[in-house]
Image (cartoon, grey):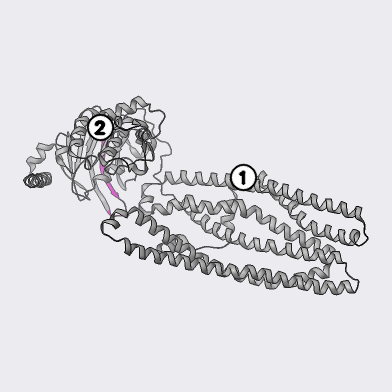
């Protein structure tokens, strides 16, 4: 697991990648006028900081030294005005940078989520859900820091340094060189700090990923942990992973604890050099006291943006790693492609033809082999076979969740590859064995929050499938809150809601994939009675393990190891005494055994 995270998620690329940065900047382009305003404000606010030491020099040398109270009052008011102006500009600047960041991140997050929705199921088969969620949450948030506090605010630090240097060299070149003599030591220390922190930061991310993965997996499987009384063992494993994360953080903090005091030490040495050299120059009457005071203030201001740039480096490093992963997802082209000139179907009859269909999830490992059969409009066809026979794969390729490798599938004579995916799926409703309900209400789960489906139609669908009785017994009826994955409902109730959901869309083709396998006998009898009515006028494909539920089907297709082995109705297949007969006999014996016990 650790290696997987390290190879896919946690190995950091360059601290700065020009290609990635150019691509990131395209998201700022719609807000470039705000960026320009922010840069201009940065130039101004960066100048106001170094202006104050210069005003201090004037105050000391021109007014204090000559006891000019009136002039001192004016310079003090100018000093105060510069502080107030800087505060106002800083407020506007902060607002603009945050605005740019939030708008940019909103656009990027929407694009990423929209792109993810368009990806084929083949992508999700191979990609852990947690990793995809991390892209839209944690990685996007890392870019938020870049756009809000990184790109634009870097200008503030750079301009501040430039203005300070400009003021310093304007006032005294020699003292400026003395002040900057410690710069090589600072540059080397900063380089070493970045290198060490980068290594430790990678370890922190790796251990955090392991911690998140462990938590997600073990919270999801909490019932298994508790039934096998593994709480203590899992707690020990979690403690070890948590400890590794703690140690990694402490190691990273160690370098911060050295670097920042180190910068302060270098700054103090610079002040000492200023006092030593500047004091000597004052004694020789080559320098004024005001200039010395100004340079001490310049020194304090000079090292602050350098420390800030180190923080920006960490933001940049995290953002580059996150952007690389985000763009890798955005560049993923695992799509079920729409045709360039799709056939638009106004209405369909519901005839389905599989013609020599071959399909594999992975390269040439075919799970469906040369499948051919036809389903007439309004016909109910059952598909049976042992686990792994390829029954569900038929549904997946009919709905174009996956594209077939060879052959063709026709809907009313049209190849489904020539039909727009949305048009195709508009006519198909699927009820799966594993029902997925969303957080919301009973009503929103049946209609899938489609405003075109009125409450009357929702109630009608619920009534047909027999869900009306239990829904009406709920305190808020159709407005009853459904929690995550329908945790407050029974398996049977969730299945009934999924039936109502399928019917609310009034499909021409209804697919039931093991739809009654998780329902108790009483509920199954209720649904079986409703199925006779709801299938009228619809083409139906029913996948079932319990053969007793599909005996009245117009046609039964028997699958075995990805091939169609038998076709016929219930009686015809029993008479053949083949695979279907053996399956039926096996289930019959099982039922007899249960009754006898």
Viewer-nearest residue: 428 or 208: 208
The picture places residue 520, in percent across and down from the top left corner, at: 20, 40
Dividing the image into 4 quarters, which one contains the N terminus?
bottom left
Q: Is residue 105 left or right of residue 221?
A: right
Q: Residue furthest top?
A: 456
Q: Is residue 224 left or right of residue 117?
A: left
Q: Secondary structure at mark 1?
A: helix
Q: Is residue 358 magenta?
A: yes
Viewer-nearest residue: 403 or 155: 155
The picture places residue 25, in percent across and down from the top left corner, at: 60, 50
Q: Is residue 169 magenta?
A: no
Residue, disc 1: 99
Task: State the image quarter where residue 184 is shown.
Answer: bottom right
Q: Earlier in the sequence, mark 2 or mark 1?
A: 1
The picture places residue 445, in percent across and down from the top left corner, at: 36, 36
The picture places residue 283, in percent across and down from the top left corner, at: 89, 74
Dot 2 and dot 1 residues touching (CB under 8 Å): no
Viewer-nearest residue: 497 or 409: 497
Q: Secondary structure at mark 2?
A: strand
Magenta residues, start to end: 349-365
Residue, disc 2: 539
Q: Is residue 127 above or below residue 570?
A: below
């Amino acid at each position: 697991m650790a290696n997987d995270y390290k190879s896919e998620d946690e190995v950091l690329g360059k601290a700065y990648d020009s290609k990635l940065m150019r691509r990131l900047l395209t998201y700022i382009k719609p807000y470039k006028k705000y960026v320009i305003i922010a840069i201009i404000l940065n130039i101004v606010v960066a100048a106001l900081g170094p202006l104050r030491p210069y005003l201090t020099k004037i105050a000391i040398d021109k007014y204090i030294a000559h006891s000019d109270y009136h002039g001192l009052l004016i310079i003090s008011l100018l000093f105060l005005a510069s502080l107030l102006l800087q505060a106002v500009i800083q407020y506007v600047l902060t607002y603009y940078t945050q605005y740019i960041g939030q708008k940019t991140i909103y656009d990027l997050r929407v694009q990423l989520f929209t792109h993810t929705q368009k990806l084929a199921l083949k992508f999700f088969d191979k990609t852990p859900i947690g990793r995809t969620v991390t892209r839209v949450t944690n990685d996007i948030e890392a870019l938020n820091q870049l756009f809000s506090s990184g790109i634009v605010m870097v200008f503030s630090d750079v301009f501040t340094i430039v203005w300070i240097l400009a003021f310093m060299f304007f006032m005294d070149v020699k003292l400026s060189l003395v002040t900057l003599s410690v710069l090589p030591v600072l540059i080397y220390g900063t380089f070493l700090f970045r290198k060490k922190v980068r290594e430790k930061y990678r370890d922190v991310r790796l251990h955090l990923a392991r911690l998140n993965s462990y938590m997600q997996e073990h919270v999801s499987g909490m019932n298994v942990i508790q039934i096998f009384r593994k709480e203590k063992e899992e707690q020990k494993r979690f403690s070890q992973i948590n400890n590794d994360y703690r140690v990694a953080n402490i190691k990273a903090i160690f370098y911060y604890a050295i670097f920042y005091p180190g910068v302060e030490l270098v700054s103090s040495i610079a002040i000492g050099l200023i006092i030593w050299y500047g004091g000597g120059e004052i004694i020789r009457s080559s320098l004024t006291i005001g200039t010395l005071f100004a340079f001490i203030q310049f020194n304090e201001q000079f090292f602050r943006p350098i420390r800030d740039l180190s923080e920006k480096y960490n933001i940049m490093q995290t953002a580059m790693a996150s952007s690389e992963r985000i763009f890798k997802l955005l560049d993923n082209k695992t799509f079920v492609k729409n045709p360039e000139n799709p056939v638009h179907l106004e209405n369909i009859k519901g005839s389905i033809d599989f013609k020599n269909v071959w399909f594999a999830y992975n390269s040439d490992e075919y799970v469906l082999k040369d499948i051919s059969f036809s389903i007439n409009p309004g016909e109910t066809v059952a598909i049976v076979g042992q686990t792994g026979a390829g029954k569900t794969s038929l549904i997946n390729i009919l709905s174009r969740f996956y594209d077939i490798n060879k052959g063709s599938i026709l809907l009313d004579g049209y190849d489904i590859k020539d039909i727009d995916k949305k048009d195709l799926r508009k006519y198909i409703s699927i009820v799966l064995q594993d029902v997925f309900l969303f957080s919301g209400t009973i009503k929103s789960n049946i209609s899938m929050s489609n405003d075109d489906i009125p409450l009357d139609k929702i109630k009608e669908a619920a009534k047909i499938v027999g869900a009306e009785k239990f829904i009406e017994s709920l305190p808020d009826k159709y407005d009853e809150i459904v929690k995550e994955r329908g945790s407050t409902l029974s398996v049977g109730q969730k299945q009934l809601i999924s039936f109502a959901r399928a019917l609310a869309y009034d499909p021409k083709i209804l697919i039931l994939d093991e739809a009654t396998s998780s329902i108790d006998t009483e509920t199954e009898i209720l649904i079986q009675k409703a199925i006779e009515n709801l299938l009228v006028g619809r083409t139906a494909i029913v996948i079932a393990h319990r053969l007793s539920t599909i005996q009245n089907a117009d046609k039964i297709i028997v699958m075995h190891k990805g091939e169609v082995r038998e076709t016929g109705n219930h009686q015809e297949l029993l008479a053949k005494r083949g695979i279907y007969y053996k399956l039926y006999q096996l289930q019959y014996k099982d039922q007899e055994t249960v009754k006898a016990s």
